[in-house]
Image (cartoon, rainbow, N blue to C red):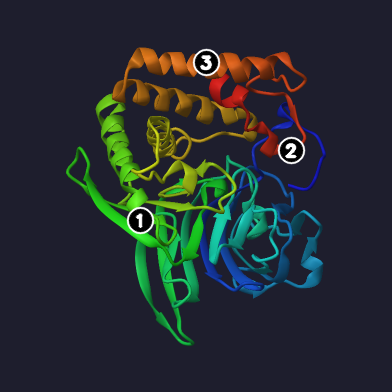
Amino acid sequence: MTRSTARYLADYSPASFTIKTVNLTIELNDTSTQVVNELTLNRQGEHQENLILDGEKLTLVSVSIDNELLSIDQYQQADHNLIIKTDKNNFTLTIVTEINPVDNTSLEGLFKSGGAFCSQCEAEGFRRISYYLDRPDVMAIFTTKVIADKTLYPYLLSNGNKIDQGELADNKHFATWYDPFPKPCYLFALVAGDFDLLTDTFTTCSDKEVALEIFVDKGNLHKAEHAMTSLKKSMAWDEQTFGLEYDLNIYMIVAVDFFNMGAMENKGLNVFNSKYVLADKLSATDTDYFNIEAVIAHEYFHNWTGNRVTCRDWFQLSLKEGLTVFRDQQFSADMHSSSVTRIQNVRVLRSLQFAEDAGPMAHPIRPEKVLEMNNFYTLTVYEKG
């Protein structure tokens, strides 16, 4: 977000349209990645309002409704929106845009760093990939086809289960991913690059075998074993404690040095900064091992508290983050000493969160007003929440 206009909790209203399915085709290029976004939309309620989509830093190529190209007088493009005039209640909207991942220094949306393409869409980054209703209460089923050079980007990853892959002309290849569970667009993820890969499997309580894959920067494979062990512990604990079974056929983690957030729980494709995944047996401390286990668990637990059950709006961020912090703290208490773990948690509250409450940045876990959504990610929202 580049705007600084205040937004208020009291102003919330449901979206005028909902999105049922999203079919994305993304052909990766350093400076001119093409995104074809095919959406099935439904008007909500009896009204004739225009469809207003969020979008930033996008080059619009074309807009079509039900395979008919719209003329320039049928839509209006602004700095942060695409306004489409239609009286249809149910229709398929196809938007073709181009984006420049190399120049995307905000590291929101789709960007390129360290020789790999990577996305970060929470809180409002998807609007830098395509025009969309970029809000957490609009949930859709995503199918994503990723196309790229097969030599430079042998791994093409996105949300859900891989349903197709193949070779194309000009040394390109593709992979198609289908996520059968509706999700808000902030959970969309795309990663393309060349990595070392650690694989394993986990058998769920219903005897379903889930493929586990951890992708790391070249040369770091030997440092990912503890993360894999932590992931399997987390999956087993969530089944045993809360009866929550993993719901896809594959669970992937990408750990890279350049990722600007600590970790992100994108559905089926978590992206981490390497610090929270890699542990070298020759130098890692007990604290390193504890923290990696806790963060791996936190992002995995989001599969249910945050992904399958998500927020209505960003003012409710603490509902998913505070609850998931509670769950990862309970997990750590069960894996280690519950008393010592509780003391550590309280020390964080007293030394850091109490200071936030006592200073000029004090705020409730559910603020009434916000200027920038990314400023929501605080110790108050997470730890106090």
The x, y position of residue 86, in whole percent, is: 71, 59
Residues under numbered marks 3 and 1 in contact, where contact means CB atoms less than 8 Å apart: no
The disc placed on residue 189 is none
The x, y position of residue 289, in whole percent, is: 38, 35
250 sits left or right of 119 in the view = left
The three-letter code of the residue at mark 1 reads Leu
The three-letter code of the residue at mark 2 reads Glu
Nearer to me, 116 or 29: 116
Nearer the observer, disc 2 or disc 1? Answer: 1
| Residue that numbered label 3 is attached to | 347
Mark 3 Cα shell of 10 Å, populated few (<14), some (14-19), many (≥20): few
- Label 3 sits on a secondary structure element that is helix
Nearer the observer, disc 2 or disc 3? Answer: 3
The disc placed on residue 221 is 1
Q: Please report the residue visible at 71 percent of the width from the left and 56 percent of the height from the top.
A: 55
Q: Residue furthest front?
A: 282
The x, y position of residue 12, in whole percent, is: 69, 32
331 sits left or right of 33 in the view = left
Could you tell me if residue 246 is visible in this image? no
Asked if 164 appears above or below 88 in the picture, the reply is below
Q: CA distance from mark 2 to mark 3?
A: 29 Å
Q: Please report the residue visible at 81 percent of the width from the left and 58 percent of the height from the top.
A: 78
Earlier residue among tags 3 and 1: 1
Mark 2 Cα shell of 10 Å, populated few (<14), some (14-19), many (≥20): some
264 sits left or right of 356 in the view = left
